[in-house]
Amino acid sequence: MEYSRAALVEAKRQIDSTLHKLRETVKTLEGREPGRYKPQITLAKRRIQAFTIAAALIARELERSGQS
């Protein structure tokens, strides 16, 4: 499936924004009672990993499309 450069740029912007929010959420939850919020912390960390991969793949696609 092909995506326009503008769509990829916007998707990466949205992912980067979500990553920032997730990282702040993890900091907040870890600063409270980490044991009580362990499931939420684990979920947020897994989402951070997934979104980081997605952002890297979009960045790679943008680099490749920029060279064409």
Image (cartoon, helix red, strand yellow):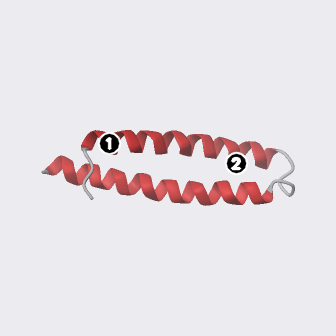
The amino acid beneath tag 2 is: Val
Residue 43 image offset from top left, x and y in percent = 68, 58
The amino acid beneath tag 1 is: Ala
Q: Which residue is mark 1?
A: 7
- Please state if 4 lies on the left or on the right of 28 as rendered: left
Task: Reply above or below: 36 against 25.
Answer: below
Q: Tell me, yes or no, whether the two marked residues, 2 and 1, touch with CB atoms within 8 Å.
A: no
Q: Residues within 10 Å of mark 2 (few under 14, many from 20)?
A: many
Residue 52 image offset from top left, x and y in percent = 49, 54
Q: Quadrant of residue 64?
A: bottom left
* Total labels drawn: 2
User: Which residue ends up furthest to the front in the rendered image?
Assistant: 1
Residue 33 image offset from top left, x and y in percent = 87, 50
Comparing 16 with 27, the one in front is: 16
Residue 49 image offset from top left, x and y in percent = 55, 59
Q: Residues within 10 Å of mark 1 (few under 14, many from 20)?
A: few
Quarter of the image for the N terminus: give it: bottom left
Q: Which residue is mark 2?
A: 26
At mark 2, the secondary structure is helix
Residue drawn at the location 86% of the way across and 58% of the way down: 35
Task: Reply above or below: 10 against 33.
Answer: above
